């Protein structure tokens, strides 16, 4: 049995990205690309060391972006929601059952065949709560089982409970070789590859080197393994500083890097190719655990009402942010209605102060409110990857709430510490760490169900209306349940459980290369140029 693992990688270059697709982000730039190049190494910047690469355990976006190169999927979902072949050539599904027929000739990195039994074992492994995979409830419902027929090359999956997006969720699981399925150490090192590349060298906190498999022929759809421009090697280079990454891009020392700060201007001016993905930049989530001041809805509402969210959005995104319309931002995002409008209160500091007065929180001699001998002092965490803008927005919240009579300690933490705080210690009141997903169903275990360590409902939310709407939506296939998914989100807004206030395009720039991107760069799409 694997022990449950902290989950979260967050905003900016390391946002928690849980998607069901490999669709392209919008791209632009590139100028005169020159001719396609052979035998090249594609070097991509990552902002932090990924740690454990086990795709059955990690939801750290940096680890999953590397896993994208190592492990194949049953299907690939395009930006318009259409589905093309991955490991599977054919499929049929509803909300409770999905059947896949595998392509012929699929092998593991050691040359042995990848069987239907191996694929089924991957799915059943995640669906068994005893194995402690954090993907349970996100992509695989608890109790899900799968059976493989090696002779027919088919895999039949029975979901543990209805799932509106069963095909997309099951189909986008990273599949590992059967020989390493029960070997956490091998998977942590990126072994058992079924995808386009194998892991050949790891230098922690420095770089990860991958080598292309010449036998890999099961790229998305009708992908041609003989086409020009495919890299022979890929290097993921750890570069924490965004300005340094931008300099390396402009000099041609690296081929790709994610940049969201002020360095984007000079990269745009240089005419570099880029992709752009809309991700949440600003979300405020309150800890509703027993004994926390933020367990009181009146307190949560007052705290938000005191904030000028438009100003906060300006500060956090350097004026580049947009107003969110929902919690799901990444394609295929099947439900694209605006479900936020009308649910976020306008700023009104006087009304916020009166609400706290009415709730019994009285300003003390030191300017901090107290009730029943307990001061209204809170702790807020946010990702260090947000950089200076994250620090500035945290300071703005701190100053605003101080004027309200609320003491706030703010703490910038790295991704592992953030995960540890939210999913293990639970010692926090306010999180400014957004969650990025591509399907509304992926939000469910974060906003309902068991709390850590038995689940991933890190904010201890118990919202009957949310659960009821989710249940209704899950029994409807695809976008048929969108009205119910919208109603579920609005139940969270109505109780001020989560407050989205800023989205921002996350750009990945490239030098002498092009690709498509969603939950990481799609390796089969990379084209290298002289």
Image: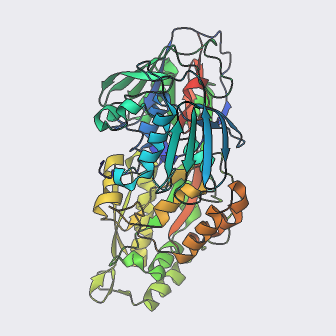
Classify 236 as above or below 7.
above
Question: Can residue 195 be seen by looking at this rendering?
Answer: yes
Which residue is located at x 64 percent, y 58 percent? Answer: 323
On screen, residue 82 versus residue 241, left or right, reads right
Nearest to the observer: residue 513 or residue 133: 133
Q: Find residue 215 and report its horizontal and vertical position in percent.
A: 52, 15
Q: What is the quadrant of residue 501 in the picture? A: bottom right
Classify 260 as above or below 488.
above
Which residue is located at x 65 percent, y 9 percent? Answer: 35
Q: In which quarter of the image is the C terminus?
A: top right
Q: Find residue 1 and report its horizontal and vertical position in percent.
A: 30, 48
Q: Find residue 444 and report its horizontal and vertical position in percent.
A: 52, 61
Q: Find residue 133 and report its horizontal and vertical position in percent.
A: 39, 49
On screen, residue 424 versus residue 228, left or right, reads left
Nearest to the observer: residue 344 or residue 332: 332
Judging from the image, the colouring scheme is rainbow
Question: How many numbered marks appear?
Answer: 0
Which residue is located at x 69 percent, y 56 percent? Answer: 477
On screen, residue 206 versus residue 340, left or right, reads left
Question: Can residue 174 be seen by looking at this rendering?
Answer: no
């Amino acid at each position: 049995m694997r022990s449950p693992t902290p989950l979260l990688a967050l905003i900016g270059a390391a946002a928690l990205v849980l998607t069901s697709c490999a669709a392209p982000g919008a791209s632009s730039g590139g100028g005169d690309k020159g001719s396609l190049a052979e035998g090249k190494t594609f070097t991509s910047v990552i902002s932090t060391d990924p740690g454990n690469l086990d795709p059955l355990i990690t939801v750290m976006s940096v680890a999953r972006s590397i896993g994208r190169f190592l492990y194949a999927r049953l299907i690939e979902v395009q930006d318009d929601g259409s589905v093309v072949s991955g490991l599977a050539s054919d499929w049929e599904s509803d909300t409770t059952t999905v059947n896949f027929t595998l392509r012929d000739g699929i092998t593991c990195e050691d040359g042995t065949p990848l069987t239907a039994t191996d694929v089924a074992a991957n799915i059943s492994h995640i669906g068994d709560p005893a194995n402690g995979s954090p993907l349970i409830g996100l992509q695989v419902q608890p109790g899900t089982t799968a059976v493989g027929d090696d002779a027919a090359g088919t895999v039949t999956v029975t979901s543990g409970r209805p799932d509106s997006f069963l095909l997309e969720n099951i189909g986008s699981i990273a599949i590992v070789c059967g020989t390493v399925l029960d070997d956490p150490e091998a998977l942590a090192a990126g072994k058992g590859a079924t995808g386009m590349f194998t892991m050949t060298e790891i230098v922690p906190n420095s770089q990860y080197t991958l080598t292309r498999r010449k036998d890999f022929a099961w790229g998305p759809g009708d992908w041609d393994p003989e086409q020009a421009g495919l890299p022979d090697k890929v290097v993921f280079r750890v570069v924490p500083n965004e300005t340094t990454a931008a300099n390396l891009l402009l000099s041609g020392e690296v081929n790709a890097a994610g940049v969201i700060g002020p360095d984007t201007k000079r990269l745009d001016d240089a005419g570099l190719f880029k992709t752009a993905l809309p991700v949440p930049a600003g979300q405020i989530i309150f800890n509703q655990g027993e004994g926390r001041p933020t367990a009181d809805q009146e307190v949560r509402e007052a705290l938000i009402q005191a904030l000028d969210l438009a100003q906060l959005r300006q500060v956090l995104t350097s004026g580049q942010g947009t107003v969110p319309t929902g919690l799901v931002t990444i394609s295929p995002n099947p439900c694209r209605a605006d479900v936020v409008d009308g649910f976020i209160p306008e700023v009104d500091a006087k009304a916020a102060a009166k609400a706290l007065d009415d709730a019994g929180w009285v300003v003390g001699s030191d300017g901090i409110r107290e009730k029943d001998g307990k001061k209204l002092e809170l702790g807020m965490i946010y990702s260090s990857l947000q950089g200076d803008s994250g620090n500035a927005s945290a300071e703005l919240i701190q100053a605003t709430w101080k004027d309200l009579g609320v003491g706030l300690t703010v703490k910038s933490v790295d991704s592992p510490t953030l995960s540890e705080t939210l999913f293990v210690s639970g010692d926090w009141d306010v999180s400014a760490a957004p969650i990025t997903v591509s399907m509304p169903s992926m939000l469910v275990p974060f906003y309902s169900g068991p709390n850590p360590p038995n689940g991933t409902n890190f904010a201890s939310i118990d919202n009957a209306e949310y659960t009821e709407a989710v249940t209704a939506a899950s029994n409807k296939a695809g976008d048929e349940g969108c009205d119910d998914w919208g109603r579920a989100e609005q139940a969270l807004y109505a109780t001020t459980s989560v407050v989205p206030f800023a989205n921002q395009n996350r750009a990945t720039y490239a030098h002498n290369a092009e690709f498509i991107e969603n939950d990481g760069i799609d390796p089969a799409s990379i084209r290298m140029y002289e």
